[in-house]
Amino acid sequence: MAQNKTTENDLSVTDFINTVTDETKRKDCFDLSAIITETTGFKAKMWGPAIVGFGSYHYKYESGREGDAPLVGFSPRKDAISLYLSSEFKNREELLTRFGKHKSAKACIYVKKLSDIDVEVLKEMVSNSVAHIRNLYP
């Protein structure tokens, strides 16, 4: 079975965030890292070359595929910051209506800048997402 390409590693989160050329996005990434650390109690770690992750869990699908993933993560992409949360956490849709300016896909939520969103709602989404994943993969 193929190995996951996105694994936890010892690369520096600070060095990675410092490569973000847009000053606002870079500051937002440092702030986001602090917010998620405060909310989860987990230190930021690099996952692969471009994802900042917090905590981890081991998953195993019915197909037999298994691996490790961060409980919560984010990545500064060209157009937006991608937030990696569970796709089915408690009150997801209701929280997203109060979250602020964003776009969402199944498990990703995209924000342009932190000033566009409600940080208190973000904290609740992060907490609910972590609880959901821990419930699925104890």
Image (cartoon, helix red, strand yellow):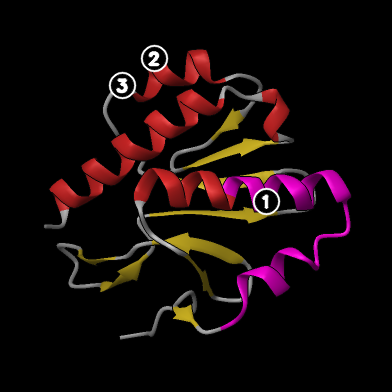
Identify the magenta region: 11-32
Crowding at label 2, few (<14), some or many (≥20) Cα neighbours within 10 Å? few
Q: Which label sits in the foreground, 1 or 3?
A: 1
**Residue 84 rendering spot, x and y as whole percentages:** 48, 49
As helix, strand or loop, the secondary structure at mark 2 comes to: helix
Contact between marks 3 and 2 (CB within 8 A): the answer is yes
Quadrant of the drawing holding the C terminus: bottom left
Dot label at residue 29: 1
Amino acid type, callout 2: Glu
As helix, strand or loop, the secondary structure at mark 3 comes to: loop
> What is the spatial separation of the Cα atoms under label 1 and label 2, in whole angstroms?
25 Å
Query: For the point 42% across and 19% down, which residue is it?
Result: 95
Q: Which residue is mark 3?
A: 91
Mark 1 or mark 3: name the one nearer the start of the chain.
Answer: 1
Closest to the observer, 72 or 93 = 72
As helix, strand or loop, the secondary structure at mark 1 comes to: helix
Query: For the point 57% across and 22% down, which residue is it?
Result: 118
Answer above or below: position of 81 versus 138: above
Closest to the observer, 40 or 91 = 40
Crowding at label 1, few (<14), some or many (≥20) Cα neighbours within 10 Å? many
Q: Which label sits in the foreground, 1 or 2?
A: 1
Query: For the point 31% across and 71% down, which residue is it?
Result: 68
Answer above or below: position of 115 versus 73: above
Query: For the point 55% across and 28% down, which residue is it?
Result: 119
Q: Which residue is mark 2?
A: 94
Say whether residue 55 is left or right of residue 46.
left
> What is the spatial separation of the Cα atoms under label 1 and label 3, in whole angstroms?
25 Å
Q: Can residue 131 be found in the magenta stretch?
A: no
**Residue 132 rendering spot, x and y as whole percentages:** 23, 41
Say whether residue 22 is left or right of residue 115.
right
Q: Can residue 25 be found in the magenta stretch?
A: yes
- Count of marks, rendered view: 3
